[in-house]
């Protein structure tokens, strides 16, 4: 889920959050976030949901390409 990987990282950076901060807010471990952002694992929908809550956004923000 390449789009999700890029978007999770972009949203995190846009909010000036570290992976550790997102881990605290979402309940997903920092190492799991690192693996997701690095493309090493495809996150489950439950993990995407937790990350969305921690990043104060919607799961759709991770998977829907916005048209310019």
Image (tube, grey):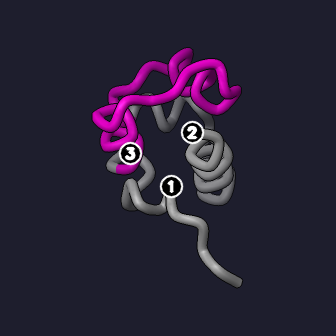
Q: Position of residue 59 (x, y in %)?
A: 38, 54
Q: CA distance from mark 3 to mark 1?
A: 16 Å
Residue drawn where x is 64% and y is 19% of the image: 40
Q: Earlier in the sequence, mark 2 or mark 3?
A: 2
Residue 18 highlighted magenta (yes or no): no
Question: In the image, which residues are magenta?
Answer: 25-52
Helix, strand or loop under label 1: helix
**Which label number is shown at residue 63?**
1
In the orientation shown, which residue stands out farthest toward the bottom?
A: 68
Residue drawn where x is 60% and y is 55% of the image: 11
Q: Which residue is mark 3?
A: 54
Q: Nearer the viewer, residue 52 or 41?
A: 41
* Circle 2 residues within 10 Å: few <14, some 14–19, many ≥20: few
**Which label number is shown at residue 41?**
none
Is residue 35 depicted above or below 2 in this figure? above
Q: Earlier in the sequence, mark 1 or mark 2?
A: 2
Is residue 7 depicted above or below 36 in this figure? below
Q: CA distance from mark 2 to mark 3?
A: 19 Å
Q: Quadrant of the C terminus?
A: bottom right
Helix, strand or loop under label 2: loop
Q: Position of residue 25 (x, y in %)?
A: 37, 38
């Amino acid at each position: 889920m390449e789009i999700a990987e890029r978007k999770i990282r972009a949203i995190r950076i846009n909010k000036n959050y570290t992976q550790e901060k997102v881990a605290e807010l979402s309940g997903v471990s920092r190492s799991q976030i690192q693996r997701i952002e690095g493309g090493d694992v495809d996150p489950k929908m439950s993990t995407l949901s937790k990350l969305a809550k921690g990043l104060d956004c919607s799961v759709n923000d991770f998977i829907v390409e916005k048209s310019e």
